[in-house]
Amino acid sequence: MTAYRLASGGLIDRSHTLGFSFDGASLSGHPGDTLASALLASDRLLVGRSFKYHRPRGIVTAGPSEPNALVTVGTGARRDPNTRATVAELYDGLAAVSQNRWPSLAFDLGAVNDRLARFLSAGFYYKTFMWPSAFWEKVYEPLIRRAAGLGRTALSPDPDAYEKSWAHCDLLVVGSGPTGLAAALVAARSGLRVILAEQDFLLGGALLSETMRLDGEAPVVFARRAVEELHGHPNVTLLPRTTVFGWYDDNIFGAVERVQKHSAAVDPARPVERVWRIAAKRAILATGAEERPLVFGGNDRPGVMTADAVATYANRYGVAAGKSVAIFTNGSSGYRTARDLAAQGVGIAALIDSRREAADAAPEGVRLIRGGSVVDTKGRQRIRALVADRGGFEELIACDALAMSGGWSPVIHLACQRGGRPVWSEALQAFLAPDVSGLVTAGAAAGLYRLAECLEDGARKAAAVVEALGRTAAGFERPVVGEETDPSFTALWHVPGAKSKAFVDFQNDVHTRDLGLAVREGFGHVEHAKRYTTSGMATDQGKLGNINAVGILAAMRGVSPAEVGTTTFRPFYTPVSFGALAGTSVGEHAMPVRRSPLHGWAARNGAAFIDAGLWYRSAWFPKAGEKTWRESVDREVRTVREHAGLCDVSTLGKIEVFGPDAAEFLNRLYCNPLLKLPVGKARYGLMLREDGMVYDDGTVSRLGEEHFLLTTTTGMAAGTLAHMEFAAQVLWPELGVRFLSVSDQWAQMSLAGPKARAILQALVEDDLSDAAFPFLAAREVRLKGNLKARLFRISFSGELAYELAVPAGFGEAVADAIMRAGAPHGICAYGLEALNVLRIEKGHVTHAEFDGRVTPDDAGLGRMMATGKPDFIGKRLSTRFGLTAADRAQLVGLKAVEADKDMRAGAHLLKDGAKPSTLNDQGWVSSACFSPTLGGHIALAFLKSGRERYGEKIVVWDKLRGVETAAEVCDPVFVDPENRKLMA
Amino acid sequence: MAYDYQTVHALEGTIGAVSERRANHLSVHRASAIASVLAAPGRAAEAAGILVASGEFEARFVAPGEWLVLSDVHAPETLGAELSVRLGDFAFVVDQSHGRVALTLAGPDAARILANGIGADLHIDAFPVGRAANVLCNHLSVNLARTGGDRFGIVVTRSFAGALVDDLKVMARSHELSVDFDTR
């Protein structure tokens, strides 16, 4: 045994014991422990295997930057891989297993990679697995992924709930250490709305492991008192267990709160994690500083930890990292750890200081080696000894833990996520945050490492925020801090004379030689070196190692770290689960369902529904005995052609337009003339894009001199409204026009078929004779029972047809009444599929035809273009050479030559006998169906110079299905080309 | 044949009588008189003045020169005509009584529940009583109005009413919420 639980001390509750397991072994810890501190207390130094070489690895840090101690927590669907043991709060029943080892953590066959290391240098994938190229996806990548990797994700559906919430504040304080608490106190007392976010489960940050006294008391007492005061302010929100992971536009911060990640029993009424989107007027980053590891031979052996982590485990968790701890430092931090350990009675093997001279004093009785270094460590799965070097004299020093301190790096990630680059400080030998607006770093995050400085800086910067927001800053009395040591250090990027691999990036197994290889092969730029060596590309994003990589690259290139710079900082600061990011947008909540006001009517009539965008539309209405959808659709089509049918068309977009310039506005919006549309009449309209292609089609009805109603296709309803807003606000702001969507106000149904008039007349007070209500009439009518409605004599099927609109709530009742009135006439309900067949038979186009490549002339609607109008959207570019070429694909009809051969949309057209090729391509099928009216398969298609080719036999080539169908080119209007039925 | 048409509410059959009212309650208005008012070009101030002057209307801001007007005094069938008469040439009026569903969310956690889907700052100082705005609630666009300290009015398009109520229930997962039609 080496690491052990101290007899007293720490912020753990020793009166309670929590049972947990690691790789099946039953262990115990206390409330207040992290998984890492409990593992350490149980002398579990070996917790993982490294990514590439499968080297034994132990805990390195006591915080969120941990590169090594990644474990899988939980079982079954709740298995969370790659959990950092150093931030995983211990709970009773926690089950953790190690990763990336087989068959076991202690005996891992993958460790052979370490022996093969000289064949596995940086970039070896690119050099080795180049040929044959087809092997990469099928063979090499799966092999590499299996050998090198992290935990496995759970593949069963996530049983837990997640949530996303918005929060707003005057000041967001990130981090609850001395700086953050001082800032939050000042802002709260000044009346600001404050959010204090802390990734830890306890508020207090560094104060939780600090031994320097404040006002003569333990720092944690100050922290508790501050938190208590903040709790009392109604304008303060405290968010423990909340990691602020990103800084976005408009000073919005993303944060993830672990609501129930610290409990074995999950309450289904609450989310397990919650993503906060925090809109902050200002933010203070009090995120502290990260201690750097030192890059020396064997620096990855279990038992080697940062000095700050060793002190934190001792002070906060009451755990000694070893019985004989060696310390290797380049500054005063190592001495502080030595003092803390000595005070706890932990043995210190030696204190090795890379500096020849320093004012720091080692605790009494501790052996101090100045101007020394560590060049190697010994031991198999835990450190047993180190090799110290001073001036070439090597000495083996026995130890069971090694604390390393390479100086400090302010945690500035958030401040650099929006493009600002970190700024190198020669004085601090560290990168500091750039000047950015809306956010400021304070305390250790700003390079101020003394406790008193942190408290003062937090209070001062919060006061500045208060003043900037136009309020008066409240006071803050800094507690008295004892004499603090000089926090300086002498940068030591890489320790010369390494006897074994000296790791820079622990998680991705990048060592100094890899960086050297990168520089040698021309990848010395920091962004190139990162990708060449994968340094900083692991899940920890190089929080520990990047700064050393930069320093080493600088040294290798003979320049300053300022010249090397850093790689780009991006969200997320630490990994965030997909579940948290998805929030509640899962299942039906990912895409809201839109229901027609006639949904109940359709359901009562046995509709089969289909998703159409967000809408849920009736597709067909199967009757007893009908086995396939085609049987139902064929019957519906025949019924409409012979009798009558009722179809829900409520989903069409409906926009009402008002104003003295409404007619002029529409005249410019549509390509066809609308100025002289009479009141009480409807007209088919085509809108173009600026480039001359069709944007959308629909009808325009004039309900009054300055009052129009237009319909859009279902899919383009929102787009058309936005298009109109753009035209009204940007293109022609001088026009007096107002408009808005009334799509939801009206239930609209199409009654089509030769019996339509007879059926409708039974319900309508007004005269519906052809003379009184002719084709394209559009006006308000009164239904019997005194219900006002809008009636339009328009047809998509080619039959005598009406569209009747009633206030949505009355839709079902009116549809039921039509069905009752139509029963003696043989009426049926018909759905989207029959509607589609009916319109194909009549040669009417939809967005299957208007696919963005089609001009009005291509669709056979060229005569609608009112080129005499002074202007309309699309007019200018419609005259482009390519858009008027004679060999453009034109809308035609196709009839399958053999009755049993069908065609499908998407198939291509070939001349009879031509080989399938892009060169021989003659066009495409846009819509196809079986026509019950014609008794064969028909299609609408676009064919080169198609209108000149009626009667020609062509081949419909469907590569997807491997089918070729002979078809005859014909006029696209298959049914009633003289419009006799329409005008009846 | 007798023609006595009955309206069907967008949420008919999807919400029902609850046994108990909980701390937070989502009340769905059975019949709402709602109309859109669009000020005639250049006439927004006059139209607003008329809407505010009358105690019979509750005008909720939608966009510059555009309001949703709700009324407890007028029936859905008559609100549009009433507004047209009052506003004259200053505005265009469109009945939306069937196109919109009005709801009221009230209770101590109302603002917190809404913060689970709405990005607007709902602090009483930032969004005081009487304020309204068109906002996104998760995927849906709604008009949100503060009608009391712990009370919000929501107006949603009819076709999305069901989806909104489903969403609000999920947004209120960690809070006590009951949903029912109003008793009015």
Image: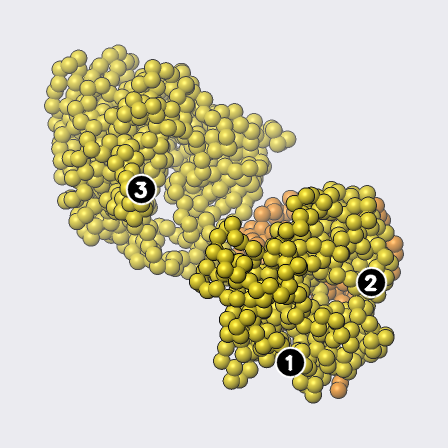
Chain colours: A yellow, B orange
Residue B110 in picture, x, y percent from top left: 58, 55
Judging depth in this view, the residue of A706 and A773 nearest the camera is A773
Tell me which numbered mark, 2 or 1, is placed earlier along the sequence.
1
Cα distance in 3D space between marks 3 and 2: 67 Å
Residue at point 20%, 28% (across, down): A501
Judging depth in this view, the residue of B27 and B150 nearest the camera is B27
Residue A754 in picture, x, y percent from top left: 72, 79
Q: Residues within 10 Å of mark 2 (few under 14, many from 20)?
A: many
Chain letter of mark 2 equals: A
Cα distance in 3D space between marks 1 and 3: 60 Å
CB atoms at circles 3 and 2 under 8 Å apart?
no
Q: Which residue is mark 2?
A: A703
Q: Is residue B101 visible?
A: no
Horizontally, residue B76 falls left or right of residue A201, namely: right
Q: Which residue is mark 1?
A: A639
Q: Residues within 10 Å of mark 1 (few under 14, many from 20)?
A: many
Q: Which residue is mark 3?
A: A133
Mark whose residue sits in front, 1 or 3? 3
Give above or below for A708 relative to A322: below
Q: Residues within 10 Å of mark 3 (few under 14, many from 20)?
A: few
Label disc, if present, on residue A572 of the rendered structure = none
Cα distance in 3D space between marks 2 and 1: 32 Å
Which residue appears farthest toward the front when viewing the image?
A913
Tell me which numbered mark, 1 or 3, is placed earlier along the sequence.
3
Judging depth in this view, the residue of A546 and A284 nearest the camera is A546
> Label 3 sits on what residue type?
Ser
Give above or below for A434 relative to A959: above
